[in-house]
Amino acid sequence: QGQLVESGGGLVQPGGSLRLSCAASGSIFSIYAMGWYRQAPGKQRELVAHISSIISGDSTNYADSVKGRFTISRDKAKNTVYLQMDSLKPEDTAVYYCNAGTIRGGVFRSTDYWGQGTQVTVSS
């Protein structure tokens, strides 16, 4: 509990930007790949971006729906993973969660390390 803490959500107009943060404990941050998921009302949770572990070189991957608009990154000094979201659309409205996971065969696999979620609402 409390090993992943998200922040940065809020209400933004279409076309605007937000930056989400996920603060992790040092042991999790240094070992795991990290992913950002989102879940909109009535929909399944979907993976939108992930970044490989530090030792694997911090390679990134994005869902087609956010490619070119979202950027995932790490700040090793702060044990924090960010999701920079630009050109936001109403369909980006969801609760966003970070997860510490693994990558096998290029596929991000979540673990039980979840944050509490942060609400992002894109509306005029």
Image: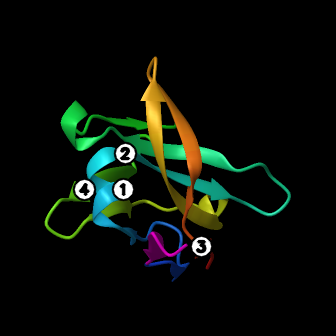
Residue depth check, mark 2 versus mark 4: number of the one nearer the observer: 2
> Is 38 in front, or is 100?
100
Amino acid carrying label 3: it is Gln
Residue on which disc 4 sits: 74
Three-letter code, disc 4: Arg
Q: Is residue 48 visible?
A: yes
Q: Of the residues under marks 3 and 4, which one precedes in the sequence?
A: 4
**Earlier residue among tags 2 and 4:** 2
The residue under the point 57% across, 46% down is 111
Q: CA distance from mark 2 to mark 1?
A: 6 Å
Residue 87 location, quadrant: bottom left
User: Vertical placement of 110 versus 19: above or below?
Assistant: above
* Residue 28's disc number: 1
Whether pointer 2 and pointer 1 mark residues with C-beta atoms closer than 8 Å, the reply is yes
Q: Residues within 10 Å of mark 1 (few under 14, many from 20)?
A: some
Closer to the eye: label 3 or 1: 1
Q: Where is mark 3, residue-wise?
A: 116
Alpha-carbon distance for marks 3 and 2?
A: 18 Å
**Residue found at x 44% / y 30%:** 103
Image height of 104 relative to 43, above or below? above
Q: Position of residue 79 (x, y in %)?
A: 25, 65
State the CA–CA distance, disc 2 to disc 4. 12 Å
Q: Are marks 2 and 4 in contact (CB under 8 Å)?
A: no
